[in-house]
Image (cartoon, rainbow, N blue to C red):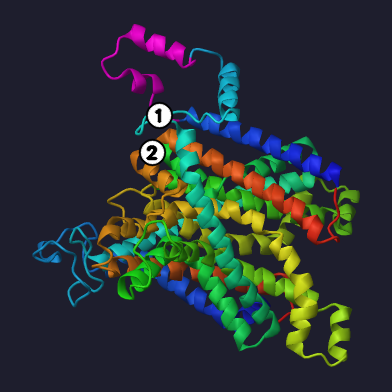
Amino acid sequence: MRDYWIRFRRDQLALGGLVVIMIFIAAAVLAPAIAPYNPSEQFFDGLTLEGSPLAPNSRFWFGTDTNGRDQFSRLLYGAQTSLLIGIVANGIAVFVGTCLGVVAGYLRGFLGAAIMRFTDLMMAFPPLLLAIALAAILRPGLNIVILVIALVNWVQVARVIYAETLALSEREYIEAARAMGANTWRILWRHLLPHLVPTIIVYATLGIATTVLLESMLSFLGRGVQPPTPAWGMMIFESQSYFLNAPWLVFIPGAAILILALAFNLVGDGLRDVLDPTQRGRN
Amino acid sequence: MLFYLGKRLVASLFILLGVSVVTFGLTFMIPADPVAMIAGRNSTPELREQIRHQIGLDKSLPSQYAGYLGRLVRGDLGKSYARKSDVGALIASRLPPTLLLMLAAIVAELLIGLPAGIYAAARRGRVGDKVAMTLSFLSVSTPQFVLGLTLLYLFSYLLNWFPLGGYGSFSHIVLPALTLGLAGGGWYSRMMRSSMIEVLRNDYIRTARAKGMPEWQVIMNNGLRNAILPIVAMIGLDVGIFMSGVVVVENVFGWPGIGQLMWQAIQSLDIPIIMGVTIVAALFIVLGNLIADMIAPLVDPRIHLR
């Protein structure tokens, strides 16, 4: 563990990503304490006399949106939405994908084949369109968005875990465990899963980046979490028609999405270099 | 080869059949009752029963599915709620602009990704490599709507180099293609880099170097030819990735393709169009995968056909 940390620490980009993630998590958790205003409050002095949003100033640090609400407060609460969906939806996807991938890769047989053919089928749907179709049919909301994203994201994990399980189960030590009379459950839990942990950690991290982007696209299309819950994609959706006059309404939440996704990508890549033994000594 | 081709074709047909089962199942999850929607609020029970019979909702599930599949095969995707017109015809009329945009995006991503990947492989481990790979991470982490709006603001509004949106000339397509292709460019640069590094490990490269060939010539003459083929074979897969992107990009740039049609359908919850576009997209992805599967053994004889 210490070893891994020492090697991870050498990767400055990944370390930077980790710091950024911790700052975003702190901002999300502390939002009620550090947000200067209520994110849903519409200020009379939050719009110009013509009714346009205000540019960033000393009272509203990141300006106001088209409804005269404080953009900075909305950004902080939006971090809650993005992180909650990113972590929970991807967590479910990784859990389901791992379980199905292990079952398909170790037990094989009819069930395994059925699972893998089903992932082939799921791969035929573009993730965003499938998510939109599901979100359009079900009523949108936080739980539905989490469910929809998890439903779309487990496929990739299942395929990767399947391939790894298949390779691992051919190894001699697994055969040895079987010869010694260990039951299937014990082999999966004690001998297989520990070797899958690095892959699971890497995909759990990289997947959050994908999830943050997918969630922002859904809410940019108006099919993500619903108002008054602030979400970064929705903030851009709402101010799209004003954006040539008030570009900060697009750039600030846009930068937040980009930075958070980039941070998870960098940490995930750094973890892959550290955890994957085949990468050791390269570069 | 022929056997392999036939096997892939049959597998693709099964996947398309599976797609139709999923989309058929999804239509049952729609909370609104289609009979009530057609009959109107003040309809009599008799009228409803008549409509239920007319659209075949009183039949058994398998026979309803058979009817659904039959209509799909004939290209009948149903009628739009809002536009009262045929979804298949609507999508067909919007397809050419989308295909044009996808083609332009493929050109854009290859123009960005391949040189960047070759450069990074040549400068492996040095500053240039690190900068190129960081930029590639940046490009795959950028939400396309933010990238599109940013390009629009910089190059169309501030600099006035390109129109603010629309369709018709070369200058209209530059920014949408760049927006759609940039993430792919970042992805290709990573693939190109690792493919090149793999090739540069070969003995014939060492021979070329030992003969005193300049490094850039080794890369361009001996390395590139072998490194680029597996990359180009993957272009077919991009179609699927672009199917998601066009919804966002076409909306941002006012591009009149199926992405924009989808966007408008999402706003008005026009479910027949949403399902229709999803089915067409799945068809494209299956075709793209099939093409990629067929090109891969042609360009790389090391791939074994099974």
Q: Which residue is situated farthest in the top direction here? A: B46
User: B260 or A151: which is nearer to us?
Assistant: B260
Membership of B49 in magenta stretch? yes
User: A241 or B143: which is nearer to us?
Assistant: A241
User: A17 or B5: which is nearer to us?
Assistant: B5
Asked whether residue A90 is in view, the answer is no
Circle 1 SS class: loop
Q: Is residue A56 left or right of residue B192?
A: left
Query: Can you identify the residue that label 1 sits on?
Result: B31
Q: Chain letter for mark 1, please.
A: B
Query: Can you identify the residue that label 2 sits on?
Result: A139
Q: Chain letter for mark 2, please.
A: A
Q: Position of residue A62 (x, y in %)?
A: 26, 72
User: A167 or B67: which is nearer to us?
Assistant: B67
User: Residue B194: which disc?
Assistant: none
**Residue B184 occupies quadrant:** bottom right
Specify the quadrant that holds the C terminus of chain A.
Answer: bottom right
User: The magenta stretch spans which residues?
Assistant: B30-57
